[in-house]
Image (cartoon, rainbow, N blue to C red):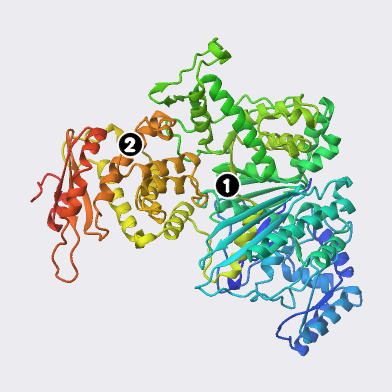
């Protein structure tokens, strides 16, 4: 049984994400394989703009010392004892693993031992290359690259490795004498640090086995970025070769044409281009000639990522799309040639590995041309189960099962399956006229635990039948459509027009739009149903007719769908959330970590994205006022959840509907309420609604939460929420109630800063069963020491009390309180206001 790869994380200087990847091998195997690598090392010397030449005497001394090393004199290291990282000045984004997770096997030998083994091959080709490299360094050039021949690698890795692109900046953008690179063929330019006042356009290309993906982003001086452009080209780089042994001439021509076009797009945008390659190039015997031809033909230097590097960068990309920084997550990324797994928390990949299981690889092996039969599907399932079991990844996941809070999927295969499930779900909603909420009464909350044990077993035919709970609540919310309820008939009752549920076209449109607001996630039960449909369709032509499946994926979806179901069953996953970001966004983050001196992963993705959007549309410098309004709204909301006078049952039932996510929704809406002024002051609340609803900048929020934020902004002035509005009427009743409650609070909070001066410093809430008093404390004028005038703010706020009364069923009043009154309110609720 092959042991899993483990990951030991080392901090480095210069703020880069230097990773030290290891493989668990026996000492004899490690020594032999390292000797083979050392004897076949080749060097390519290219000019470098500027370099500090190393001291000849010190280089010679180290060379002679290394040459005299022998296997018996190597530093001893237990296969289960990790090497001690050197003390370095600055922490990287990746830090030490958590202590409460299982202790996975550590590397069999440290980096010093590895270099000693490689240097032991004195007099070989490696020794000659080393001398040539030393001479080149003294002349201002750099030598990089190790040509690894067939049989030297396992899973695309060559012994302990470090991230090559990250390695480029470990010493200010240059390689040191001890640094080395696998499959790299070009000189590494020095990385220029970007001054604080600059912004930068970056482009990242993921040369995948199935398709090439490019993203162009604009990054600010803190490393935060927003997407400017995306492009995708279906290249099928891994097709036509058995086991990805070589890149065929046809595939190479398609790749060159695609790279030319993507480079042109990046150049048009003025973006710095970075291209990374994954499984298809990593495993090809002719990868060096392919990379050279890409460089000679297009001028683009391609970096070949190891499997672990790819997994870690995917995790970094996911952190930019989902608010899971503080969660322990299991990420699964199914590509054309490989599947990457990561267990990570707080930006640190605690475990990372890559397996040779991809949708193109499996489809070509068991369903040539996309045509499948029952026996082939059975063999496919057995093959996947054996590889998963032998890889050791199942033991690691099972060992961390209690710590894993969420399972996340990414990339094309999983996104396609999610879209197919979404289409099936929408059809089911229309047939029943109801919407099942995945989070009980709250349809906008974050998913609960997504990695749980499943007692499901695989069907020997086409798909595994689950006997476990799917993780979804069985309760369903009847959708209000313009004051009418779309009721489920409970059967296939007949109605006019042949619609079994008896709903009209208007209601059907509302139900489809409601389905679009559901979180991008799916359960094992939903996955098995879709896999069954895919397996039942024997040909690509038949699969292309399945709802949600793009025609271009019809011939390769089978392998990926069966693989994902087997992963669910083997790892006990009951629910998976889907990330729109993956490897290419991770490459962007990696690049930013070296480009901007103060870059760090944002723990609070939601707030960061809200503030970025608010700053972008900061017309008239209203951001400070909006932030103050958000503070007032939070104070009112917190006050309404407690009783300052009267009995313990004085809290309004409306408040019981709200949870922590709703607090964040209210804060985001209040901060963004003014952004429509960027277009026009007239009707700016409607402009704000449009900008928020169609923005791609609000990262970390579910589609339902984005809709709630947009509607709150729309209703913070003028007309309050009404079911006459189609966008509001389509929402489940519980969400409508939440919006009404939050809107009543937000309208008062915004009114209390009517003059944009922050004159109303804070608000205290005093309530009983039938009444509610809002005590406003004015801010103190720093010039005179007197309380500021809040008469206009009080007038504006009183205009919103009627709607407040309608929602919370309490007679409201608003008064001015001084600091003493506020202190008494906080300390002695029984005291009355001095107003």
- Position of 765 with respect to 468 (left or right) is left
The kind of secondary structure element at disc 2 is: helix
Q: How many marks?
A: 2
Which residue position is annotated with label 2?
740
Whether residue 139 is situated above or below residue 203 in the rendered picture: below
For marks 2 and 1, give the CA distance.
Answer: 34 Å
Q: Is any atom of residue 363 visible in this view?
A: yes
- Graded by Cα atoms within 10 Å as few (under 14), some (14 to 19) or many (20 or more), the crowding at tag 1 reads many
Q: Position of residue 8 (x, y in %)?
A: 65, 60
Q: Quadrant of the N terminus?
A: top right
Residue at image coords 47%, 39%: 704
The mark found on residue 329 in the picture is 1
Q: Position of residue 293 (x, y in %)?
A: 85, 64
The mark found on residue 689 in the picture is none
Nearer to us of marks 2 and 1 is: 2
Mark 2 or mark 1, earlier in chain: 1
- Graded by Cα atoms within 10 Å as few (under 14), some (14 to 19) or many (20 or more), the crowding at tag 2 reads many
Q: Please, which residue is most extreme toward the left here?
A: 834
- Position of 50 with respect to 599 (left or right) is right
Residue at image coords 89%, 57%: 150
For residue 96, what is the image quadrant? bottom right
- Position of 308 with respect to 795 (left or right) is right
The kind of secondary structure element at disc 1 is: strand
Q: Position of residue 27 (x, y in %)?
A: 80, 60
Nearest to the observer: residue 731 or residue 527 = 731
Q: Position of residue 425 (x, y in %)?
A: 58, 28
Q: Is any atom of residue 4 visible in this view?
A: no
Nearest to the observer: residue 754 or residue 95 = 754
């Amino acid at each position: 049984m092959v042991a899993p790869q483990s990951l030991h994380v080392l901090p480095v200087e210069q703020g880069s994400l230097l990773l030290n990847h290891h493989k668990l091998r026996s000492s004899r195997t490690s020594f032999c394989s390292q000797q083979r690598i050392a004897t076949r090392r080749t060097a390519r010397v290219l000019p470098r703009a500027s370099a500090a030449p190393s001291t000849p005497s010190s280089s010679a001394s180290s060379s002679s010392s290394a040459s005299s090393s022998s296997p018996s004199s190597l530093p001893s290291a237990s296969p289960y004892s990790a090497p001690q990282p050197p003390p370095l000045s600055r922490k990287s984004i990746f830090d030490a693993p958590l202590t409460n997770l299982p202790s996975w096997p550590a590397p069999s030998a440290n980096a010093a031992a590895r270099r000693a083994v490689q240097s032991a091959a004195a007099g070989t080709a490696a020794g000659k290359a080393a001398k040539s490299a030393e001479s080149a360094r003294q002349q201002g050039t750099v030598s990089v690259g190790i040509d690894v021949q067939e049989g030297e690698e396992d899973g695309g890795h060559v012994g302990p490795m470090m991230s090559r692109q990250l390695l480029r900046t470990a010493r200010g953008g240059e390689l040191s004498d001890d640094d080395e690179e696998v499959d790299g063929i070009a000189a590494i330019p020095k990385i220029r640090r970007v001054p604080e006042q600059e912004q930068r356009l970056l482009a990242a290309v993921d040369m995948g086995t199935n398709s090439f993906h490019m993203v162009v982003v604009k990054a600010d001086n803190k490393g935060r970025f927003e997407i400017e452009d995306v492009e995708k080209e279906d290249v099928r780089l891994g097709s036509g070769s058995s086991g990805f042994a070589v890149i065929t001439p046809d595939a190479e021509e398609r790749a060159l044409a695609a790279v030319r076009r993507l480079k042109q797009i990046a150049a048009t945008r003025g973006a710095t281009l970075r291209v990374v390659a994954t499984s298809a190039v990593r495993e090809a015997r002719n990868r060096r000639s392919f990379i050279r031809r890409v460089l000679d033909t297009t001028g683009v230097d391609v970096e070949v990522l190891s499997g672990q590097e790819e997994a870690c960068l995917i995790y970094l990309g996911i952190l930019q799309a989902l608010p899971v920084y503080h969660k322990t997550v299991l990420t699964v990324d199914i590509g054309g040639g490989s599947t990457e797994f990561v267990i990570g928390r707080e930006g640190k990949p605690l475990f990372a590995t890559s397996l040779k299981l991809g949708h193109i690889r499996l489809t070509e092996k068991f369903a040539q041309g996309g045509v499948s039969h029952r026996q082939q599907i059975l063999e496919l399932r057995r093959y996947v189960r054996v590889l998963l079991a032998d890889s050791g990844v199942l033991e690691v996941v099972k060992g961390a099962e209690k710590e894993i809070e969420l399972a996340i999927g990414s990339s094309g295969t999983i996104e396609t399956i999610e879209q197919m499930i979404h289409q099936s779900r929408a059809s089911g909603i229309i047939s029943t006229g109801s919407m099942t909420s995945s989070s009980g009464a709250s349809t906008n909350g974050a998913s609960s635990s997504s990695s749980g044990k499943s007692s499901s077993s695989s069907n020997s035919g086409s798909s595994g039948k689950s006997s476990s709970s799917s993780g979804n609540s069985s309760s369903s919310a009847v959708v209000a459509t313009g004051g009418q309820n779309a009721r489920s008939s409970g059967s296939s009752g007949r109605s006019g027009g042949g619609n079994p549920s008896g709903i009209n076209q208007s209601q059907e449109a509302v139900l489809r739009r409601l389905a679009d607001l559901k979180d991008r996630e799916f359960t094992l039960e939903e996955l098995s149903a879709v896999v069954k449909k895919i397996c039942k369709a024997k040909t690509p032509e038949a699969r292309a007719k399945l709802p949600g499946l793009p025609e271009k994926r019809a011939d390769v979806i089978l392998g990926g769908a069966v693989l994902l179901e087997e992963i669910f069953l083997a790892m006990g996953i009951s629910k998976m959330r889907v990330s729109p970001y993956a490897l290419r966004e991770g490459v962007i983050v990696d690049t930013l970590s070296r480009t901007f001196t103060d870059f760090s992963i944002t723990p609070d993705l939601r707030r960061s994205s809200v503030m970025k959007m608010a700053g972008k549309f900061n017309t008239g410098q209203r951001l400070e006022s909006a932030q103050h309004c958000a503070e007032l709204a939070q104070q009112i909301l917190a006050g309404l959840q407690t009783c300052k006078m009267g009995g313990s049952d004085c809290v309004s039932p409306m408040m019981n509907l709200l949870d922590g996510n709703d607090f964040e929704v209210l804060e985001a809406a209040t901060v963004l309420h003014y952004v429509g002024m960027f277009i026009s002051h007239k009707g700016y609340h409607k402009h704000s609604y449009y900008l928020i609803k169609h923005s791609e900048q609000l990262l970390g929020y579910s589609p339902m939460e984005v809709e709630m934020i947009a509607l709150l902004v729309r209703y913070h002035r003028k007309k309050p929420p009404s079911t006459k509005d189609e966008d509001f009427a389509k929402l489940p009743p519980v969400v409508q109630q939440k919006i009404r409650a939050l809107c009543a609070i937000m309208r008062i909070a915004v009114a209390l800063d009517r003059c944009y001066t922050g004159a109303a410093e804070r608000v205290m809430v005093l309530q009983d069963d039938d009444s509610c008093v809002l005590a406003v404390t004015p801010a103190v004028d720093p010039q005179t020491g007197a309380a500021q005038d809040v008469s206009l703010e009080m007038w504006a706020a009183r205009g919103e009390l009627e709607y407040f009364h309608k929602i919370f069923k309490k007679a409201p009043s608003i008064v001015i309180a001084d600091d003493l009154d506020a202190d008494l309110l906080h300390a002695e609720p029984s005291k009355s206001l001095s107003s």
